[in-house]
Amino acid sequence: MSASTLLRRLLPAAMAASVLLAAPAVRAEEALPHEHWSFSGIFGGLDLAAAQRGFQVYNEVCSSCHSMNLLHYRDLAGIGLTAQQIKDIAASKTVPGPLDDNGDETTRPGTPADVFKAPYKNSKAAGAAFGGAAPPDQSVLLNAREGGADYIYGILTGYVDPPAGFKVPDGLYYNEYMPGHLIHMPQPLHDDQVTYADGTKATVAQMAHDVTTFLYWTSNPEAVTRKRMGVRVVLFLVLMAGLTYTVKRQIWSDVEH
């Protein structure tokens, strides 16, 4: 059998196998909910109200388990909080202070220059509190997950009763959007878990949307600025192209005629 004949016979089988292998990934992507995000697309911007509500959800709910080690309280100016609001938020935290004269640890109120207070001293302590699986730091979590914002939103809203016959081991929970459908994290969000200052109803879906918006900002703090700069550059280039063409027509008009 020639090599070309063998290739013709094997090619259909190889193509069929590739389709079968790719199918689960396609179905998994289609299974994610597709929310409307203010930051989507080239002209997308950050919904500051949603990001501020999302910080409240993180601060009151998520921060009890998840650290945010790459952010300082002063960074919250990026979601529109005032200097006084930031100062008050930081001061509400108790952070490690300098050693006293006896070499013992002390504590002090936080300042805007402090890193977000972590719920545990280190990753080993966090892992020990959760059976060896330390909750991930959320600073750039959204960028680290395939599916991005839709994945985070899906996980937060995906806690449902398992289908009949599906066995959920002790210490795990069923989540329809988690690969394998089993997750170590118990359902973190419940209706009316926080009270929004702007009167927004704190449903699970709303809180998930808001905290995902906040996590987009923590993962991409310069994204909105970059998008705006990109749009300005494109508009500038279009304007310059138009001016250049107009000048060219004027200069060469006599020659062309």
Image (cartoon, grey):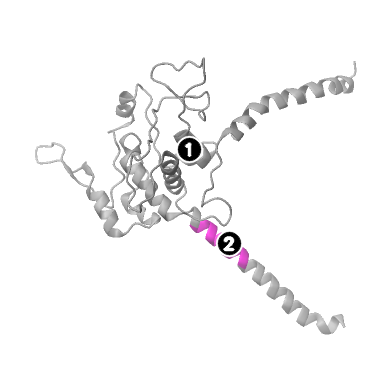
Q: Magenta stretch containing residue 207, yes or no?
A: no
Q: Residue furthest left?
A: 102
Camera-side residue of 195 and 55: 195
Q: Is residue 214 above or below residue 118?
A: below
Q: Earlier in the sequence, mark 2 or mark 1?
A: 1
Query: Label 1 neighbourhood size at 10 Å, few (<14), some (14-19), many (20+)?
Result: many
Disc 1: which residue: 152
Q: Are marks 2 and 1 in contact (CB under 8 Å)?
A: no
Residue at the (61%, 68%) spot, across then down: 236
In the image, 44: left or right of 195? right
Q: Magenta stretch containing residue 229, yes or no?
A: yes
Quick one: quadrant of the N terminus? top right
- Where does the image place residue 63, in percent across and percent down from the top left? 33, 39
Magenta span: 225-235
Q: Please, what is the dominant secondary structure of the magenta stretch?
A: helix
The image quadrant of residue 131 is: top left
Disc 2: which residue: 231
The image quadrant of residue 124 is: top left
Looking at the rendered structure, the secondary structure element under dot 2 is helix
Camera-side residue of 157 and 56: 157
Residue 229: mark = none
- Where does the image place residue 229, in percent across and percent down from the top left? 54, 61
Whether residue 98 is visible here, answered yes or no, is: no
The amino acid beneath tag 2 is Val
Whether residue 30 is visible here, answered yes or no, is: yes
Q: CA distance from mark 2 to mark 1?
A: 28 Å
- Where does the image place residue 143, in percent across and percent down from the top left? 50, 41
Quick one: quadrant of the C terminus? bottom right
